[in-house]
Amino acid sequence: MKHRKRLIVGGIVLFAAAAGTGVGVAVAGGDDGDVVATGPGADKARTAALELLPGGTANSVERDSENGATWEVEVTRADGGTVDVRLDAAYDVVVVEGDDEDGDN
């Protein structure tokens, strides 16, 4: 009986540890509290945004639903200005907006 309890408890602990690791990867927070996306989909979104704004730098990629988008990529343009590029599920541009988080765009 004791052996069975140890197996059950061990299984629960192992499951909780694995689940906690998965959540930590999927919900990595950014400096401003937004959820930063990683993985192949985020990489595709980053590439699509940078193709639209050559010479730019992708600062972050997030999941988004604003304006019907699926992805939001914050890009610093070659001229130093920052924009949010919103993309749909097919990585097509929905809208490009000035990033006014600093209040100066």
Image (cartoon, grey):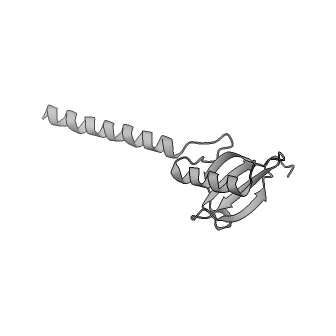
Q: Quadrant of residue 32?
A: top right
Query: What residue is rendered at 38% in x and 37% in y?
Result: 17
Q: Quadrant of residue 2?
A: top left
**Which quadrant holds the N terminus?**
top left
Q: Position of residue 73 (x, y in %)?
A: 67, 52
Query: What residue is rendered at 75% in x and 60% in y?
Result: 96
Q: Position of residue 78 (x, y in %)?
A: 80, 47
Q: Position of residue 87 (x, y in %)?
A: 64, 61
Q: Residue furthest left?
A: 1
Q: Is residue 50 above or below residue 95?
A: above
Q: Quadrant of residue 93?
A: bottom right
Decide if residue 102 is on the left or right side of residue 57: right
Depth order, front residue of 105/51:
51
Query: What residue is rendered at 75% in x and 48% in y?
Result: 55
Q: Is residue 84 above or below residue 23?
A: below
Number of marks present in the image shown? 0
Decide if residue 20 is on the left or right side of residue 77: left
Q: Is residue 67 above or below residue 105?
A: below
Depth order, front residue of 81/2:
81
Depth order, front residue of 83/101:
83
Q: Position of residue 77 (x, y in %)?
A: 78, 49
Depth order, front residue of 97/24:
97
Query: What residue is rendered at 81% in x and 52% in y?
Result: 100
